[in-house]
Amino acid sequence: MTSPTPPTPPSAPAPSPHDPHDHADRAASFDRDADVYAQVRPSYPRETVEWLLPAGARRVLDLAAGTGKLTEVVVAAAPGADVVAVDPSLPMLGELAARLPGVTTHQGTAERIPLPSASVDAVLVGQAWHWFDTDAAAAEVARVLRPGGTLGVVWNDRDAEVDWVARFGEILHRGDRLEPAAGHVPPAGFGDGFTSVEAATFRWTDRLPAGALRVLAGTRSYLLTLPDDERAALLADVDALEATHPALAGRAEIDLPYVTSAYRARRR
């Protein structure tokens, strides 16, 4: 019996001349190759989104929605709700709109949300809170939320307790001076406008075709902003890891384990 041919992963995004150690350059790097980002970045567990959403939410904002990885789970978890997506990147929003035509999109930032006051029941933020001016963002979220509405913040973290995943993470972060500040930072609180933060974690696994670790690595802001030669060296190390690690070598598909950390608070 002939083994099935594994799917061909998309090409990695082209590198950028921006400064890999500058927070603003890193935040702006996601404008390029939104289609690649949409194909290889992980989604979110539905149970996480159901935990974040308040019961009976009628209008939900996905803030810094990107290509809609979180948005599509919100749509599935809240049938009948009016789902709105806001992001500063028009290429990202274009990808989202093509995949989720029923979602209203607006170009905007967390610090200046283009929605009326008290107009949504929930604001969810996936993998982006660390890019914000958090004090200004919390104030804007409080403005657009109805009283009693929910702010939910979520991160996918690779499960570094798995040996090959830890080695993959070491390659991705090698030389990254911003990583301690720009990585997953659990919020201690969202300010006086919100109740205390509740937290929950969810474990799950994303399945990728062979070769997609290189592409996934190439969508990270650090690699997107590295000079060509430094970026190529890190991607070559990712290839070597996949080719030689006993948990990865020769496999048509790769199971990448994640720990999703979720935080929620209510608007007072």
Image: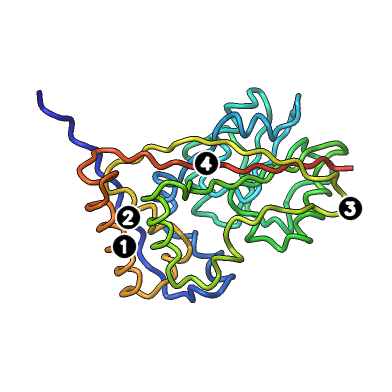
Task: Compare marks 1 and 3 and give the one earlier in the sequence.
Answer: 3
In this rendering, position of residue 260 left or right of residue 209? right
Q: Amino acid at mark 2?
A: Arg
Which residue position holds label 1? 235
Quickly name the residue at label 2. Answer: 214
Q: Secondary structure at mark 2?
A: helix
Residue 192's tag is 3
CA gap between label 3 and label 2 equals 43 Å
Few, some or many residues within 10 Å of mark 2 (<14, 14–19, 20+): many
Marks 2 and 1 close (CB-CB < 8 Å): yes
Q: Position of residue 223 (x, y in %)?
A: 41, 65
For label 4, the residue is 69
* Label number found at residue 97: none
Q: Amino acid at mark 1?
A: Leu
* N-terminal-most mark, 4 or 3: 4
Closer mark to the observer between disc 4 and disc 3: 3
- Mark toward the start of the polypeptide (4 vs 2): 4
Q: CA distance from mark 4 to mark 2?
A: 20 Å
